[in-house]
Image (spheres, helix red, strand yellow):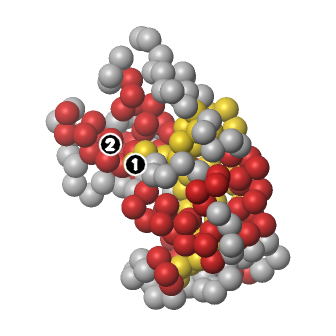
Amino acid sequence: MKPVKFSTDIVIIDLEASCKTFGANVIAESNIIEIGAVKLNKKSLEIVDVFSQLIQPADYPVLPQIADITGITQDMLSDKPLFDKVMNQFIQWYGNRNKSILAGWGLYYDLPLLRKECERFGIDYGKSFVGGGLDVKSLAYLWLAKNQRSTTGIAIERVLDRMSLETDFEFHRALDDAKATALILKKVAEEYN
């Protein structure tokens, strides 16, 4: 099978967050507590580099429910840097804004949260990243429907299972979720060769 060829490299990002009220998913009342990302080669969609960092939340400590889901506790973050320091490291790792595009699972939450945190800390998001991103969750819906697989209860772990892909990940941890999303993107892209 011929390899997929995108015009830019793809960086799949995943965020874990703390919040003021569990389950509300209010971006204005959330802080990023972990960034995980993988760089994919534009021709092969193979992972060529990874980024992973825990972040001390500036406003909203980790709630017990979030710790239960992610395994990330407030104690784990007490000596970690704040968002601005980690984001500057991420921007350095990401590289030139015109060489890659951000992608992820359900970017309707992650990108607005990333932009909000950048604004709070005085980081110019647009200087480092091109506008929107590639939402792999939407592509997974299409793949599942096309292949007569159920589209209900769509979550990364269920999609991996429905695509017969590796499921040995620590879900709800940013780097593993980014790696899993990369596998899903590659599977979807193979359909179009």
Q: Nearer the viewer, mark 1 or mark 2?
A: 1
Q: Which image quarter is the N terminus in? A: top left
Task: Tell whether 188 sits left or right of 102.
Answer: left
**Vertical placement of residue 174 versus 142, above or below:** below
Using a 10 Å C-alpha cutoff, classify the residue at mark 1 as few (fewer than 14 neighbours), some (14 to 19) or many (20 or more). some
Q: Which image quarter is the C terminus in? A: top left
Task: Tell whether 67 sits left or right of 5.
Answer: right
Q: Amino acid at mark 2?
A: Ala
Q: Position of residue 3 (x, y in %)?
A: 47, 16
Residue nearest the observer in this picture, 173 or 30: 30
Q: Residue at x 51, y 84 (%)?
A: 29
Q: Amino acid at mark 1?
A: Asp
Tally the marks.
2
Q: Position of residue 173 (x, y in %)?
A: 58, 59
Residue 55 seen in the current view: no
Q: Position of residue 90 (x, y in %)?
A: 71, 54
Of callouts 1 and 2, which one flags the residue occurring earlier in the amino acid sequence? Answer: 1
Which of the numbered marks, if any, corresponds to residue 135?
1
Q: Are marks 1 and 2 in contact (CB under 8 Å)?
A: no
Residue nearest the observer in this picture, 77 or 96: 96
Q: Secondary structure at mark 2?
A: helix
Q: Residue at x 68, y 41 (%)?
A: 96
Q: Position of residue 30 (x, y in %)?
A: 53, 79
Which of the numbered marks, if any, corresponds to residue 140?
2
Q: Residue at x 50, y 39 (%)?
A: 182
Q: Residue at x 54, y 21 (%)?
A: 43
